[in-house]
């Protein structure tokens, strides 16, 4: 089992080290990760600058590892098509500091790394942690939760067109309430612009994360279930075509654009 690991917090972040340590029990691990933080960069790729992949020995000698001056999507693409002799069987992205919920699936570099794998027909899992300060995270505790999850994932064959968006509560194995497979809650407005005045009276805007202040969350969705202490898993499907919508749109335009 060949496992490719990436993240968006950068190769020196303790979250990716925790992930690598766990996944080493399940297969041959390769790491291709950004050389610095690339959070909220979505699924961007590098087009107008050269990309450098530097091999290193940041992990155990059994793990081949490269740091890349690009995005998480760049890293997975290069890992699959350039750096690994054979494509990976599965890709993991994370462990991200801070949860990825709801609309975050469109902004997150962590999820984009996993999504890049699905574009290559490779199963993928994005993993995030409901904590915001790595300095105070007990990653030994996090690894126990992630290990239990990985055991189940590796027992089955994941569908290639769907990535799993996983969020871990920051809690112990004993206090974790279990696993919930839930929909992402697209109605939650997690971020809000805050206006600030500079000394000259010009207003600047800062995007504030109000995750900690959110209330009245819908039941059995990703936001509410994670807050209740569950590990949440949300399948995110990559669909390039929708037959019913195509037929509907064809009816719309066949009566107008195609009319003589």
Image (cartoon, rainbow, N blue to C red):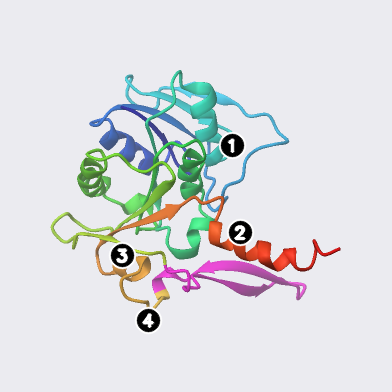
Picture quarter containing residue 231?
bottom left
Of residue 155 and residue 185, the one placed in the foreground of this image is: 155
The location of residue 194, given as percent across then percent down, is 60, 74
**Depth-wise, is mark 1 or mark 2 nearer the camera?**
2
Residue drawn at point x = 49 percent, y = 50 percent: 238
Which is more foreground, mark 4 or mark 2? 2
Q: Mark 4–mark 2 contact, CB under 8 Å?
A: no
Q: Which residues are magenta?
A: 185-212
Q: In the image, which disc is placed on residue 70? A: 1
Label 4 to label 3: alpha-carbon separation: 14 Å
Question: Which is closer to the viewer, label 1 or label 4?
Answer: 4
Residue 42 highlighted magenta (yes or no): no
Q: What element does badge 4 sit on?
A: loop
Quick one: label 1 or label 2, which is nearer the N terminus? 1
> In this figure, which residue is indicated by the disc labeled 4?
216
Using a 10 Å C-alpha cutoff, classify the residue at mark 1 as few (fewer than 14 neighbours), some (14 to 19) or many (20 or more): many
The secondary structure type at the circle numbered 2 is helix
Q: Is residue 106 visible?
A: yes
Q: Give the mark nearest the N terminus, 4 or 2.
A: 4
Residue 215 image offset from top left, x and y in percent: 38, 79
Compared to 67, does 134 lie above or below?
Answer: below
- Picture quadrant of residue 16: top left
The first of marks 1 and 4 along the sequence is 1
Label 1 to label 2: alpha-carbon separation: 36 Å
Report the front residue among 21 and 236: 236
Q: Which of the marked residues, 2 or 3, is nearer the chain's N terminus? A: 3
Which mark, residue 246? 2
């Amino acid at each position: 089992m060949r496992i490719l690991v990436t993240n968006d917090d950068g190769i020196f972040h303790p979250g990716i080290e925790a992930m690598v340590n766990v996944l080493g029990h399940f297969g041959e691990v390769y790491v291709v990760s950004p050389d610095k933080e690339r959070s909220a960069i979505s699924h961007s790729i590098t087009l107008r600058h050269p990309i450098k992949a530097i091999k290193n020995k940041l992990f155990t000698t059994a793990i081949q590892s490269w740091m890349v001056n690009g995005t998480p999507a760049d890293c997975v693409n290069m890992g699959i098509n350039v750096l690994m002799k054979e494509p990976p069987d599965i890709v993991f992205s994370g462990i991200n500091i801070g949860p990825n919920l709801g609309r975050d699936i469109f902004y997150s570099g962590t999820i984009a790394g996993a999504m890049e794998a699905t574009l290559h027909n490779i199963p993928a899992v994005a993993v995030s942690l409901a904590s915001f300060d790595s300095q105070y995270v007990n990653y030994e505790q996090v690894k126990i939760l992630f290990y239990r999850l990985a055991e189940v994932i590796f027992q089955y064959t994941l569908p290639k067109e769907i990535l799993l968006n996983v969020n871990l509560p920051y809690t112990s194995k004993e206090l974790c309430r279990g696993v919930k497979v839930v929909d992402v809650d697209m109605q939650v407005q997690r971020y809000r612009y805050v206006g600030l005045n500079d000394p000259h009276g010009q207003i600047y805007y800062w995007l504030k994360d109000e995750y900690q202040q959110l209330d009245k969350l819908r039941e059995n969705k990703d936001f509410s279930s994670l807050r209740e202490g569950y590990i949440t898993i949300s399948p995110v499907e990559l669909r390039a075509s929708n037959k019913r919508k195509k037929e509907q749109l064809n009816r719309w335009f066949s009566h107008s654009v195609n009319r003589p």
